[in-house]
Image (spheres, grey):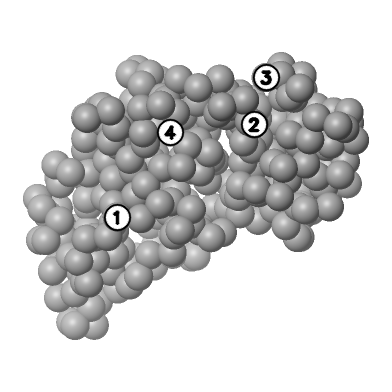
Amino acid sequence: MLPFNFTYYKPESIQEALELYQTLKVQGKTPLYYGGGTEIITLGRLNLVYADAIIDLKGIDECKIFEVQNDKLIIGSTVSLSVFEAKELFPLLTDTSKEVADYTSRNKITIGGNICGRIFYREAVLPFLLADSAVITAGPKGIRKLLLSEIFHKELQLEEGEILVQIITEKEYLHAPHLSIKKRKQWDTGYPLLTVASLKKDGYLRFAFSGVCPYPFRSISMEEILNDQKLSYKDRVLASFEHLPNPILNDIEGSNEYRLFVLEHTLSSILSRLGGE
């Protein structure tokens, strides 16, 4: 149970959702957009989230799509993570998302909810950062289509009242060689220590990270070093650490020193398995 009362709305179009949000704001309400609701429930119970109006986006057709059209994979923001296991159109996304929580939770967690969430892991964003994916958003200023890398900086930079509608990935990336490695210190479905996803495009390895810093990220400068064939795998990995964003996480899941130790072995394994020559 949530420690606050709220009014529930389920619009059937993007425009209806946007207008509803603005109307509620004018009325002095505190509205929240809702996909799967798991984070609202979790943080609401801790008094870290409050809303007196919930706008459920799952009734909007554009937010429910999951298919390839014109050589592009289109994923609506309210598609649940479990769907990627049942319909494996983007194997790297499947491998990454199936490690989020347990299957029952993944039935409720949506791709948009994971990417836009406040819990800092948000590992479902990693494959899209690696695949140069684009996003469609809708807000008071209209529809925007941007590369994810242009709008994701530590978190998805949405304007007040704006929603993530779709994520679009070019077909050429969908079956590229890849790996997603998640390391946990505790039980199989507990919070991760860290996750590293890698995708190989035109012989070049791309890397994205979750759980290393307080936000997910892709580092081009780290990639350049990790692809430097003049260095040994170990030297590449250690040199790449100089380009890690700070601070490195230091929490109950693991100290910053332990995270770097695990990250070193994880990156070395990826280089070996995907062929970093």
Residue that carries the numbered disc 4 in the rendered image: 105
Amino acid type, mark 2: Leu
Q: Nearer the viewer, residue 34 or 269?
A: 269
Count of number-bearing discs: 4
Residue that carries the numbered disc 3 in the rendered image: 274
Which quarter of the figure has residue 8? bottom left
Amino acid type, mark 4: Ser
Secondary structure at badge 4 equals helix
Mark nearer the viewer, 3 or 4: 3
Q: Position of residue 161 (x, y in %)?
A: 28, 69
Q: Is residue 51 above or below residue 115?
A: below
Residue drawn at (21%, 29%) of the image: 69
Which quarter of the figure has residue 263? top right
The mark nearer the N terminus, 3 or 1, is: 1
Secondary structure at badge 3 equals helix
Mark nearer the viewer, 2 or 4: 2
Asked whether the beta carbons under mark 3 and mark 4 sit within 8 Å of each other, the answer is no
Residue drawn at (71%, 19%) of the image: 275
Q: Is residue 232 left or right of residue 117?
A: right
Q: CA distance from mark 2 to mark 4?
A: 31 Å
Amino acid type, mark 1: Lys
Crowd around label 4: few <14 · some 14–19 · many ≥20 (10 Å): some
Q: Nearer the viewer, residue 205 or 87?
A: 205
Can residue 241 be seen here? The reply is: yes
Residue 205: which numbered mark, if any?
2
Q: Position of residue 77 (x, y in %)?
A: 30, 44
